Amino acid sequence: MIDVSIIMINYNTASYTIGCIDSIIKNTSSTTTKEFIIVDNASKYEDYSHLKQYIDEKAETENTKLIRSRINTGFGGGNMIGVQHAKAKYLAFINNDILFKNDCLTILKNFMINNPKAGVCGPQAFTENQKILPTIDHFASLGRELFGRKFLELINSNKFPKRKKLYIEPQRGQFVAGSFMFFSAEDFNAIGGFDTNIFLYYEETDVCKRLLKINKLAYLVPKGEFIHFHGASTPKSIGLKAELKISLLYVIRKHYGYLSYFILLNFLRIKYFFSSLLKPKNWSLFFILLKQAPLSLSLKQNQKVLQK
């Protein structure tokens, strides 16, 4: 059996995808067998063709597969397309805008072998300027949204360990960042994988909440290290900001119930009403919140099927 299936989404960023694959090949020991499953999420045809040429050349020396989706299915949907082709014991969902600093796959594989309670883990992320990026985080919740992460860490550091601390030993968190999630395939499949109702954002809270229900935990493994060109694959826009709130409210209602959803919805309405007075571009976000930010307003509903 293959050790690790590496599942990666490309969306109009073939140069990042190629750099990421080269980085993985360069840094991964031959003792860890792997396959690459790259899902092109309806990129422009020129970008897809560039990537396909590279994958075709790599196919002679590496176990690679490129799958073309003619509709953008988002983070969860794209990754679940890849999962259907995976054959390995472990699944590594890796953003294409990262570079390995060391042999992350072998380090994470060995950690999972030695820690059967772990359902998912991730290596330590850094910016290109070597500044630490949080790998573990606290579940999206009403408390986190109302009071902030720092307050939670201050009042209960055991339940809410510091996110921006450079750890030496493995550290349990509530979830690990979606830029690099390394799962036991058995556990991931047992909970049904990613919720494809979510187009973007908060997939980590959702999937790790469901892992917790089968008593599987999330860990940072700081011995593994990678560089993340943070946000390179999803540039900011007001549409993505709205998507953030749609996904957040969906996850809150799914895992915490209607009352938490209702309180948070009205908190966000008040917040963005006043922010819109200073930043008029936020009015569109405020009106989405007035409509209760339903999944029907998600970017997922606006995707077009490409001709090729």
Image: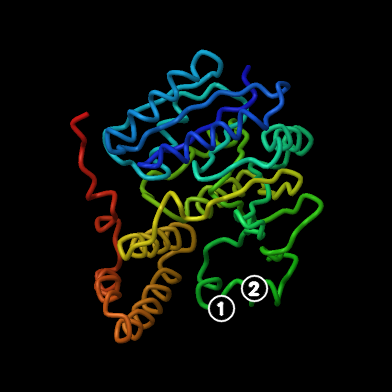
Depth check: give the residue in front, 164 or 286: 164
Task: Classify the position of the N terminus by image quarter.
Answer: top right
Mark 2 — residue?
152
**Residue occupying image coordinates x 56% and y 28%:** 5
Q: Is residue 307 above or below residue 269?
A: above
Residue at the disc numbered 1: 147
Classify mark 1: helix, strand or loop: helix
Q: Position of residue 145 (x, y in %)?
A: 50, 72
- Number of numbered discs: 2
Whether residue 291 sits left or right of residue 124 in the image: it is: left
| CB-based contact (under 8 Å), mark 2 and mark 1 | yes
Tell me the residue at 57%/61% (across/down).
Answer: 139
Residue 279 in picture, x, y percent from top left: 32, 80
- Helix, strand or loop status at disc 2: helix
Q: CA distance from mark 2 to mark 1?
A: 7 Å
Q: Earlier in the sequence, mark 2 or mark 1?
A: 1
Residue 226 image offset from top left, x and y in percent: 64, 46
Left or right relative to 23: residue 54: left
Q: Amino acid at mark 1?
A: Phe
